[in-house]
Amino acid sequence: MADPILPTQARVVVIGGGIIGTSIAYHLAGAGCDVVLLERHRLTSGTTWHAAGLMVTFGSTSETSTEMRKYTRDLYARLEAETGQATGLAQVGFIEVASDKDRLEEYRRVSAFNRLCGVDVQEISPQEVLDLFPLAKIDDVLAGFYVKDDGRVNPVDVTMALGKGARMKGARIIEDCPVLEVLDDGRKVRGVRTAYGDIACEVVVNCAGMWARQLGKKNGVTIPLQAAEHYYLITEPIAAVQKHWPVLEDPGCHGYYREEGGGLMIGLFEPKCAPWKIAGIPEDFSFGEISPDWERMGPYVERAMSRVPITLETGIKKFFCGPESFTPDLRPCIGEAPELRGYFVAAGLNSIGILTGGGLGRVMAHWILNGRPDVDVTGFNIDRLQTFQATPEYRRTRTVESLGMVYQCHYPFRSMQTARGVKRSVLHQHLERQGAYFKDVSGWEGTDWFAGEGETPDPGPLSWDRPKFWSHWQREHEAVRQGVILMDMSFMSKFSVEGRDAGRLLNYLSTNEVDGPSERVTYTQWLNDDGGIEADLTVTKLAADKFFVVASDTCQRHVETWMRRHFENGHAFVTDITGSYAQLNIQGPKSRELLQTLTTADLSHEAFPFRTARKIDLGLAEALCLRITYLGELGYELYIPTEMAAYVYEQLVSHGKAFGLVHAGLKALASCRMEKGYRDWGHDIDNTDDVVSTGLAFTCAFDKPNGFIGQNAVLTKKGKPLTKRLVQVLLEDPEPLLFHAEPVWRNGERVGYIRAASYGFTLGGAVGLAMVDGGTSPVTPGWLSAGRWEVEVGNLRVPARVSLKPLYDPENACVKL
Ligand SMILES: Cc1cc2nc3c(=O)[nH]c(=O)nc-3n(C[C@H](O)[C@H](O)[C@H](O)COP(=O)(O)OP(=O)(O)OC[C@H]3O[C@@H](n4cnc5c(N)ncnc54)[C@H](O)[C@@H]3O)c2cc1C
């Protein structure tokens, strides 16, 4: 075969011709972009060729993911007409069955959200499940969830159709051409190297599937994904099986079922899975299979077959195992790598690459061409992941859990159980002695709640109801509101920013004035040019050329990258000091009194007003003390050099006895901040939101001489009627719980959904934040009070109150004591 002839340059080079690479090339070419796709061997030869081809829009409580699925199904439906290449799309329908009460609750909640997003999902009876899939066993089925327009595609055909469509729009697709390395100049991408020559380009998109990690590593780009064994079997023909039967899925039995070759395909997601080739994926693995592990899989296969009992007596034609990439949190790795400009990644599809591939291609193309995505990517952006998550041991350990998570019941308070303990606060053992129940907080062991001194925490069974630790949570919440609590939040991301230009540059990033007087904490937003929120954080000015930036754990790399990329031409240096300081929160109405017993600094309101930041003595030690709160009370954040943290903690606990000091965890943080309506980036606000509709315009200092990034975008919104606004929602009934994604109704119509929620022990009910859409009506206090509000919780519509102002302490009196 003749060597491929390569262009010498292109704007974008896509590496890898699986479903994702071809979809991105298709969408880039469609937007008129000069794009080349290089495939190591043949299109689909990695994972795509052997996918089962389920095309399902049901099942996610992420708006972004649901929109991607819907877009994908629509795209696959029109590709054949556009390209002349069939996709094998068969909209035979899809049924998810629930055979226990917890899954029933989950799917009802998911259905409500999916319907809000425009997915036509109906709850059907067991008999209706049987009517649609007559070989299913339904004696234990409680309900089915049916989407009649879902179904399946042929993954190879759909990839070929995307490839053909991409070529028709001007993309060049070159097979048998592995990318040997990506070329960069230390800061940004400048091209790719192949055995047949180099191609100069501005952007590469690493779509190399399970090879993406090892390819990224060559340029220092961390892509923490890992291949794992993934199985399906195909039975011998079964006379009764009909081609038009819907795809059936029963996560409780670990299986999905669809017609294949006159028999059934049974796909499996076993609860404990097996990572494949930790050390590295062989470069020459192509259209490859893995020898199935019959012994490990036997019990799962049997259980899966029990849902369609005839399969237990039918021969197995093929037991197939192929590798698929999984990520630490079961969400894809997409976006521009923090390490290198112009290096984009779209990999780690966690077994839904076919059914999200079309939408993902559209999102990536938009992101590449416009510099930012047009959907919420806070949960998907590669910069949420950290470098330690790519270590062999991390991948070996975590991947055992992640594939199994696909079919677990997605309980609200579940934390990943594997790959734990890697990051611990220096106070870990002290907290353990107080009965801390730990959860995974970006790799840290963060205390969720405390069982009490000397007690062993027992979280009880996972459930959708009030958890067993309810009384501990309530006690901690009430201590925040009425007494004083100690909360270890050492996992918060902390940065030192120093240099002659540090103040000027930070001020330009920040909506608020952060370069005023020293010893001042400022709550601010960072926006992009379109006014979308990129970060929500505090900036503290310590001295003219010295600043302290604190953000939440999830956006550590996002915030750091944002600063580094904006400081390139200035005299400002960013150091991540997260691990150098413990963070202890002393919060609550009695916090001043307690802290005053330990320091000679005057903590009176006059001497140490709200937003003051000062180094203070604490007995023998010193700490940076910020008078600020995320709980809505008088309170202080202490940033203590880690080596002094245990001493300070011991002093606080001992002096705290007289004040009834209570240890509090993240559950109390969540419930207190939610009562106060404090925002949390990545949960209730995201990159597609602006400060005006999210109620954060108060952070904008429009009179700063040099303005701030995104100022013009904010000004175009400010003062205009807003048809979408973030509101606080409180259920009138104290019993039902809110978690996330519950639709919000006004006068019998859906107008939004709960983005994040908790339980308001002070307010007396579940409380959340929702972006509500008034359609043609501006969302004003009058419009809110004129409506009859409800929240859809499972199959119930629960009356609710809504408010633009915080329902707890709207005048901030408690904070400014
Ligand atoms: C058994 C099984 C069943 C599945 N069923 C479904 C399903 O029903 N529905 C669904 O949505 N998903 C399903 N999936 C998941 C789906 O197949 C994947 O998510 C998807 O195929 C991943 O696509 P990709 O483009 O990221 O990776 P790949 O298809 O692996 O593509 C990556 C490509 O990159 C190429 N490449 C690698 N290195 C280089 C290099 N250096 N230079 C050039 N090219 C390179 C490879 O050759 C490969 O072609 C299933 C997966 C498995 C294993």
Image (cartoon, rainbow, N blue to C red):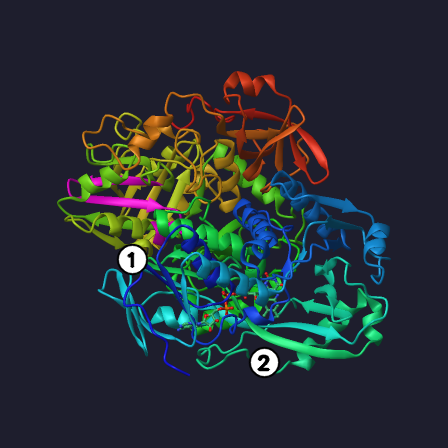
Helix, strand or loop at label 2? It is loop
Name the one closer to the observer, 218 or 622.
218
Name the one closer to the observer, 302 or 354.
354
- Mark number displayed over residue 290: 2
- Identity, as a three-letter code, of the amino acid under mark 1: Arg
Q: At which x and y percent is residue 344?
A: 37, 59
Main SS, magenta region, reads: strand
- Identity, as a three-letter code, of the amino acid under mark 2: Ile
- Mark number displayed over residue 326: none
Helix, strand or loop at label 1? It is loop
Name the one closer to the observer, 447 or 506.
506
Q: At which x and y percent is residue 782?
A: 53, 16
Ligand 1 contact, mark 2 (Cβ < 8 Å):
no
Q: Circle 1 is placed at which residue position? A: 341
Name the one closer to the observer, 133 or 513.
133
Q: Is residue 554 magenta?
A: yes
Query: Disc 1 to disc 2, how far (Cα)?
Result: 36 Å
Q: Is residue 784 magenta?
A: no
Q: Which residues are magenta?
A: 536-558
